[in-house]
Amino acid sequence: MGYQAHFRVWRGGDDGGLRDYTVEVNEGEVVLDIIHRLQATQCPDMAVRWNCKAGKCGSCSAEINGRPRLMCMTRMSTFDRAETITVTPMRTFPLVKDLVTDVSYNYTKAREVPAFKPPAELGPGEYRMQQVDVQRSQEFRKCIECFLCQNTCHVIRDHSENEEAFSGPRYLMRVAELEMHPLDQAENRPEEARGDHGLGFCNITKCCTDVCPENIRITDNALIPLKERVADRRYDPILRLFRRKRD
């Protein structure tokens, strides 16, 4: 049984604002369905980024009633029918138009993470590792790069001046994944995380974990272990003595 819902959607660029719409909602629909209906019936010039509509491409990230979410995974049934639903673009990234933001910051940070470096003596097909190591990194590979964790991280959300020094939870998680990989031969990834990627800015509030649509435990399983490895390498007296003797 359909009903009429009240939406407030951001229109325009930085100088734009919220506009009110009344739009039909049918059973089983998600917020992205309603945005598409608005495009089809009331505002054909509305800009919105989307692709798979299955929660796997990460394209339709937005803020719904102030919470970073995927529009295609936010069911209308979770809202009261009398509630006004506000849809705005991700706040952390520069606004292009309407619900589309410029997320190129993330691709810049991705290029700054050194790639996996396998042992030189092993060729393709010769890699061997324990199943427990496979499972540990497999969780991080579920990331769909929706950038909701980047968007909600207050280190850059509230302090844009940190963008140059801080890679954000998504790419610190990538560093952690490579550091935990038993075959990765890159030297001192924890120190790179601390110095090049700004791990020290993270104060483990778990806001990134809270908004992850893949339920990756970013803080507990990636960021905190990476911080522990940094602390061990820099401050553990036994390891410091070992490094001194080795050098």
Image: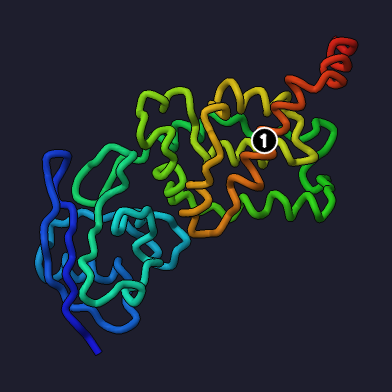
- Looking at the image, residue 211 lies above or below residue 41: above
Residue 142 image position (x, y, % from top left): 58, 55
Which image quadrant is residue 229 in?
top right
Q: Residue at x 84, y 21 (%)?
A: 239
Q: Residue at x 85, y 33 (%)?
A: 121
- Looking at the image, residue 226 lies above or below residue 72: above
Which image quadrant is residue 58 in?
bottom left
Residue 137 image position (x, y, % from top left): 69, 49
Residue beneath disc 1: 226
Residue 26 image position (x, y, % from top left): 26, 82
Residue 136 image position (x, y, % from top left): 72, 51
Left or right of 155 in this view: 7:
left
Crowding at dot 1, Cα within 10 Å, few <14 / some 14-19 / many 20+, comes out as: many
Total tally of numbered discs in the picture: 1
SS label for mark 1: helix
Q: Residue at x 74, y 55 (%)?
A: 135
Q: In which quarter of the image is the N terminus?
A: bottom left
Coloration mode: rainbow
Residue 36 or residue 244, whichever sits in front: 244
Q: Which residue is drawn at 67% across and 54% down?
A: 138
Left or right of 45 in this view: 50:
right
Q: Residue furthest bottom?
A: 1
Amino acid tagged 1: Leu
Q: Quadrant of the C terminus?
A: top right
- Looking at the image, residue 67 lies above or below residue 35: above
Left or right of 190 in this view: 238:
right
- Looking at the image, residue 6 lies above or below residue 14: below
